[in-house]
């Protein structure tokens, strides 16, 4: 199975709502990532988990809260978002390398988030 | 800090022709990985090709090849025999940092 799945595909939420994005992979990868992508822009790295521990947080606002319950799952909890947070949220996974670098990433199809 | 620069926002090529997409980067690391990713209009990002910085030999994958110049910090992608299905955004990436992308259109 070389697939990264993300649910839901689309999400519309108000600024006072709490919602979660989910990501799953069964490739045995031990690194998982969240990216935010605005239209016609590159993915912006948000968080990296390596061996289920948060290793990189790109100064993301606290209204985004990541969670890695196990090596196959990655969640992104959303609370009190702003309209400017509307974007495509991409999940990816890869195998960390012994050198401390990261190998090529496998991406999910993304969740299209709209904040009203 | 690591930076990746793609200076060609848009490019077009005729079907069956060859096109080269440019990428430059900056890093203080000596051992790193470079990637080209493709994001078609359906938006699922997929890997095109990867290059390990300690390998001098340029990577190739079928019609895709790179010209990796480590000293110049340059990493260009050559697509030979372009096909309509190559139409997509192409992102150059250094580890997990992405350039701004190049929108490639292959014309029939």
Image (cartoon, coloured by chain):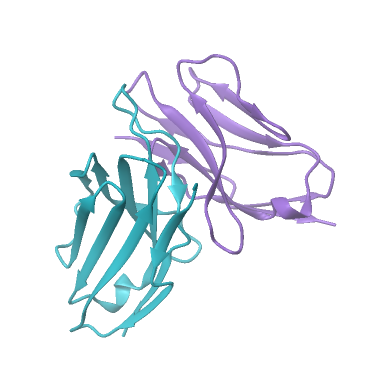
Chain colours: A cyan, B purple
Direction from residue B72 to residue B78 in the image, left or right: right
Q: Residue at x 17, y 77 (%)?
A: A80
Given residues B44 and B31, the one toward you in this image is B44
Could you say which quadrant of the image residue B41 lies in? bottom right
Q: Position of residue A68 (x, y in %)?
A: 22, 53
Q: Residue at x 20, y 57 (%)?
A: A67
Residue B46 visible in rendering: yes
In the rendered picture of this protein, how many numbered marks are placed on residues? 0
Q: Residue at x 36, y 18 (%)?
A: B30
Q: Position of residue B50 (x, y in %)?
A: 53, 31
Could you say which quadrant of the image residue A99 lies in? top left
Image quadrant in which the C terminus of chain A is located: bottom left
Q: Residue furthest left?
A: A62
Q: Residue at x 47, y 31 (%)?
A: B34
Given residues A93 and A63, the one toward you in this image is A93
Q: Position of residue B74 (x, y in %)?
A: 53, 28
Given residues B51 and B8, the one toward you in this image is B51
């Amino acid at each position: 199975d070389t697939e990264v799945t993300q649910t839901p595909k689309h999400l519309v939420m108000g600024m006072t709502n709490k919602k979660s994005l989910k990501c799953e992979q069964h490739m045995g990868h031990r690194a998982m990532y969240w990216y935010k992508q605005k239209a016609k822009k590159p993915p912006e790295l948000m968080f990296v988990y390596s061996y289920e521990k948060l290793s990189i947080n790109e100064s993301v606002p606290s209204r985004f809260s990541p969670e890695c319950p196990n090596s196959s799952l990655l969640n992104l909890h959303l609370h009190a978002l702003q309209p400017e947070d509307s974007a495509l949220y991409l999940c990816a996974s890869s195998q960390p390398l012994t050198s401390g670098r990261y190998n090529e990433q496998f991406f999910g199809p993304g969740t299209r988030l709209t904040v009203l | 800090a690591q930076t990746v620069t793609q200076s060609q926002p848009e490019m077009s090529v005729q079907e069956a022709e060859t096109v080269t997409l440019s990428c430059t980067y900056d890093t203080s690391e000596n051992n790193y990985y470079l990637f080209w990713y493709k994001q078609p209009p359906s938006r699922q990002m997929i890997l095109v090709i990867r290059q390990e910085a300690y390998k001098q030999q340029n990577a190739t994958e079928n019609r895709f090849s790179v010209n990796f110049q480590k000293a110049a910090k340059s990493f260009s992608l050559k697509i030979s025999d372009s096909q309509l299905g190559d139409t997509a955004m192409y992102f150059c990436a250094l580890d997990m940092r992405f350039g701004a992308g190049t929108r490639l259109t292959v014309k029939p």
